Image (cartoon, rainbow, N blue to C red):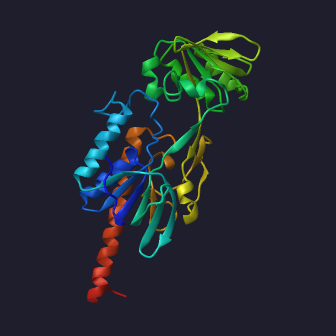
Amino acid sequence: MDDVMQDEYDVVVIGGGAAGLNGAMMLGRSRRSVVVVDAGTPRNAPAAAVHGLLGHDGTPPAELLARGRAEVRSYGGHVVAGEATGATRVPDGFEVSLADGRSVRGRRLLVTTGLVDELPDVPGLRERWGRDVLHCPYCHGWEVRDQAIGILATGPMATHQALLFRQLSDDVVLFLHDAPHPTDEQAALLAGRGIRVVQGSVVGVEVSEDRLTGLRLADGTVVAREAVALGTRMVARSSVLTDLGVAVADHPSGIGVHVPADPTGRAGVPGVWAAGNVVDLAAQVGGAAAAGAWAGAQVNLDLVTEEAERAASALGDLPV
């Protein structure tokens, strides 16, 4: 159930994933009025469970978020469903517009909108995404251990990904697809670990009884596989920040586009912080949650400093 959204808050958090909810919880624990605007489209929705998160390993993503929303509310925070479509600067803060015509104001913004995974244009991949088409050996590799794993190359990190999954299975095949051929050094590493390299474009996914069974090449060859790993192009959901002049940039590792932020989470525009996958494209749930908590604390510190300076100025005690 949605909370009734007030007109104004100390902080508006845009994005209701791990980063946004943890940031909001930290703000609520600091007795800040805070609302989380949640579009309800978490990146990990297709996954059956969250892994690698201490104390919560194996928890379904929806359950983890439900617990987080309850914790935010326990400290007086509000969580509302809605898609934030834009933000503009107004006196003493920002106004956030929602797709349904509503708006809300906040003295500060914390943007935790996450990212979108862009998959290769191969029919059938998207339908299996988060099930037996994967990207992260630490998130889902254990679940496909000892299976026949295919690595669908999408860029220069393919060899790195193949070596990581080789730790989990003796049967790993690298499909070059349309990626560059491995360098001599990469080829030696692959050969050393017994990773076969298959040339030719992948044009389809073979499925039987709702289980992936192989990848089909352009020449009609089908290579039997039980799971496929690939590197997506990760693109930060940043459109809500456009009118504020917050910059986006290619990630230094070449894996996608992100919102640069300093170590405190400041996103380059006064009053705006960003945290989680919108900044750190490679962050897992635990890392995103930690970044949100840290950013929330920094937002509170900024507000505390502003309020103290105003109070001192009103008393005439602030040095000029």
**Location of residue 159 with respect to 81 vertically, above or below:** above
Relative side of 187 to 294, left or right: right
User: In the orientation shown, which residue stands out farthest toward the front?
Assistant: 100
Question: Quadrant of the image for the C terminus?
Answer: bottom left
Looking at the picture, tell me which residue is in the foreground, 142 or 107: 107
Direction right: furthest residue = 219
Q: Position of residue 151 (x, y in %)?
A: 60, 22
| Image vertical order of residue 23 relative to residue 166, above or below | below
Image quadrant assignment for residue 208: top right
Image location of residue 274, percent across then percent down: 46, 55
**Residue ranking furthest to the left:** 74
Residue at x 50% of width, y 29% of height: 136
Q: Position of residue 91 (x, y in %)?
A: 44, 76
Total number of numbered labels? 0
Residue ID at (40%, 56%): 13
Q: Position of residue 96 (x, y in %)?
A: 46, 62
In this view, 88 is above or below 184: below
Image position of 217 (left or right of 53): right
Does the rendering let one see residue 317? no
Q: What residue is drawn where x is 45% and y is 59%?
A: 273
Q: Which of the 4 quarters of the picture holds residue 117?
A: top right
Q: Is residue 105 visible?
A: yes
